[in-house]
Image (cartoon, coloured by chain):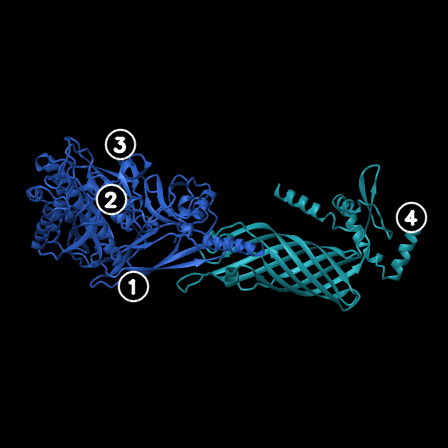
Chain colours: A cyan, B blue
Amino acid sequence: MRYKSLALGLTLFLIPALPARADRVGVSLASGLFLPSMKEFREIYGSPIPLAFAVSWTKTSGLGFSLGIEYVDKSGRTLGDGGETLPLRFRMWTIPAAISFGYDLGWIRYAAGLGVSFNSYKETWEVAGLENLSSSSRRVGYLALLTVEVPFSSRFAALARVRYMTLSTNASSFLAQIVNLGGTSLHIGVSYSFAANIAVRVNPLRGIPRTLVRGGIENSPLRGQAAVFAVLMNRKRVVSALQGLQSLDPTDSKSVELQRSRKEES
Amino acid sequence: MRTATFRGAAVLLSAAVILVSVPQPRHLIKIPKAEPAVWVLLERLQLDVAQELQTCFLARATLDEVRALRGKGVPVAVLDWNIGNKDYILVRDPGLSRRAILERRGRIAVLESGLVLFWSAEGPSARSLPRGLSRKPLPTWSVLPYLRPPSAAPAGVVPRAERDPVVESILAEISAPKLRAAVQGLQDFKTRYASTSQCESAGALIYDGLHGLGLPTEYQAFSFSGAYSSRNVIAEVRGVSYPDDILIIGGHYDSYAQTSPETSAPGADDNASGTAAAIEAARILARHPLDFTVRFIAFSAEEWGLYGSKAYAARVRSRNERIVGVVNLDMISYVKKPDTLVEIIVNEASSWLGDKAARATSAYTTLVPRKTVNASFVYSDHASFWDAGYPALLEIEAGDNPYYHKTTDTIDTLDFDFFTQTTRAALAVLTELAQPVRAGVPATPAGFSGRVVTFYSLFNAAKKANLSWNAVSGATGYHLYRSGRSHLDYERITSSPVAATTYSDAYLGMDSYYYYVVKAVGADGRESNPSREFEVKPQGALGDVSGVPRFALIRNGGRP
């Protein structure tokens, strides 16, 4: 039930973001520093180094959507009185999803966005006999991010990202009334992107969306929502369509030719 | 026009400054105990708790604190909107007819069944209160640090303790004739009403008796009710192993009678009996070396409002003395045969002492003990020790004495068989706690102390007790014992004797009390008396408290 609600919420949230026509699709790999907001978190674990992977779709209008996955794994020592400490380990998987709006100036692309993150964390006591003190749970957080990309080839770019995330666990402890796992992440990495068009057409008679991968643009006012349904109901076709996106790259002369011929056919 | 505007603004600004700078008035409030979150809220808000009662707390609070409590769903009742310099007195409810007298002399609030609060808006409340009513002034300090939430300790019948031959032999020294002589001696003063010279003379008699036993004895003078002064009498048997850990046995020696307390208040049962038992305990224990120090105290001005014990408890608190427990004896010699019931009354923090006394009473006497946790029973000297944060019990006869506070409360109404048994009960628990030095076993390990090491992660915590003690000559090792209840039910945690004089007990849960003692083991395997106790207190999480019982958010740590 929880996952269904989450999926529905995410879907509704992402409806306006999903472009009927995405001009760039990209993937990125980044790492850096996670600076936790909670003082005690920093004292126990310092600043963990996250490893982040993300995919993004960006329209020519600048509106974009990104979805990623991130992992943090850090050892720490307990706080306390008496000068003795015990080993701890903290691990967290984060799936951030964000809508952003940005500009492409050619030599630099930058975007600012807001989103949600789905987080799964676990803190373990690495001491025999104290395993029962370990804690784990899953929580949803909110995030704001700023991304800057500097292309160094037609498809590759250097990436820098600052992301602030709130993540209240609702868990009370001896150190805080509510343990907060949020904080600021500083990422640097590499992105790979290419231009692509995804069009969606709705069959008004059946009311069933149909995914099309065409060179043309569907101007239906419901295209965003239709795209969501299309993605949900025609996942296989979308995947196969995405596999063919390479051939639709507008910077590629063959693709331009192909698009033109398809337009004429339609 | 402009001038008038400026003036108006200046007036408004001044009024605002005055309003902001005037401190908030403090209210006397009643907080029911029924809400489980109340214990946490008191601690979280660091409320100025004046008194714990059986069903509620009385606290001094600002309006913001009242709002905070009500915001958490606690139905706070404001008893007095402005405390000012007023003093408040708990009074045993005198009944509807006499309540009217109180209402004419001041204000009252019914707190719970049988208990009212009295205060006067004009001058000291004690002067406005009619004589003869059982009373106790509210402490002017916060008793919050001394409160203890109800434990999960089993209630009802307590297991009978094993008889210890050494304790048995000591109890055999109790002399009924000596008890009788002591009561007679006190009764012979005609009255011991604390404001009279006879009371002072009675104090001198007690002093001479205790001093004559060879014990270091002293007076503690104090003033009460504005115009009077009196003296407590204090004697001591110094402990061998732990001289700074102190047990107290005592009772008040002043008396009262309703008709003419200045001239006739024999007070044989109330409370020559308790005083005589304390003197008899001193006579016996003066001849026996003990591990812990025992003080024998005759308090004065109890009938006026526990003034003597209040002065003494304040003194030991200011000196930061370690009081292990207090046995207060008040009216222990009247019984309607064939009744054998004796009441042992404690508050939650003293519950272990009540259980210890009940077990000793079952083991060493023919009496039937009835331990009751009742924080509202504050009409004797034990309550002064509760207010100062020390464990204390009241031992008192169960039946109503028809001669109570009358000129007929004389020695001929007492039952000396019963009196001897109640004295045995008191001396038994005192002796078990004070621990007679035994022959043929190693000496009690001295210097037992500990340090708690705490480990915090983001979500949880654990702790460890690092214990240490002094080496005992002739000991081949040491056994450590641990319990969840003070002075009760220790279980050995060392499978074989440890040779070192240190021990770490890891890891402990955060939400429990732990009590440790160490015993030295001789070459023949016999164990010494236990050391003094080291207490590890629980610690609560910092979570939101709405509807959450204390420690509910905390998981227990692993046990070794």
Which one is in front in this view, the residue at disc 2 or the one at disc 3? 2
> In the image, residue A121 lies at what x, y percent?
56, 54
Q: Position of residue A32 (x, y in %)?
A: 63, 65
**Which chain does the numbered disc 3 sit on?**
B
Would you name the residue on which mark 4 appears?
A266
Residue that carries the numbered disc 3 in the rendered image: B95
Tell me the crowding category of disc 4: few under 14, some 14 to 19, or many 20 or more residues within 10 angstroms, Cα based. few
For marks 2 and 3 on the same chain, the one whose residue lies earlier in the sequence:
3
Judge left or right: residue B518 versus residue B403.
right
Residue B544 versus residue B491: which sits nearer the camera? Answer: B544
Task: Name which residue lies at 41% across and 58% down.
Answer: B454
Q: Are marks 4 and 1 in contact (CB under 8 Å)?
A: no
Is residue A84 positioned above or below B158 on the image?
below
Closer to the eye: label 1 or 2: 2
In whole angstroms, how far apart are the C-alphas of marks 3 and 1? Answer: 63 Å
- Quadrant of the image occupied by residue A5: top right
- Compute the Cα span from label 4 to label 1: 92 Å
Q: Are marks 1 and 2 on the same chain?
A: yes
Q: Quadrant of the N terminus of chain A?
A: top right
Type of amino acid at the residue the image marks with label 4 = Ser
- Horizontal side of residue B269 vs B70, given as left or right: left
**Chain designation of label 2:** B
Please give the chain letter of the residue carrying mark 1.
B
Q: Which of marks 4 and 3 is in front?
A: 3
**Which element is circle 2 on?**
helix
Instruction: Give the image quarter of residue B259.
Output: top left
Question: Neighbour class for label 1 at 10 Å: few (<14), some, many (≥20)?
Answer: few
Cβ–Cβ under 8 Å for marks 3 and 1: no
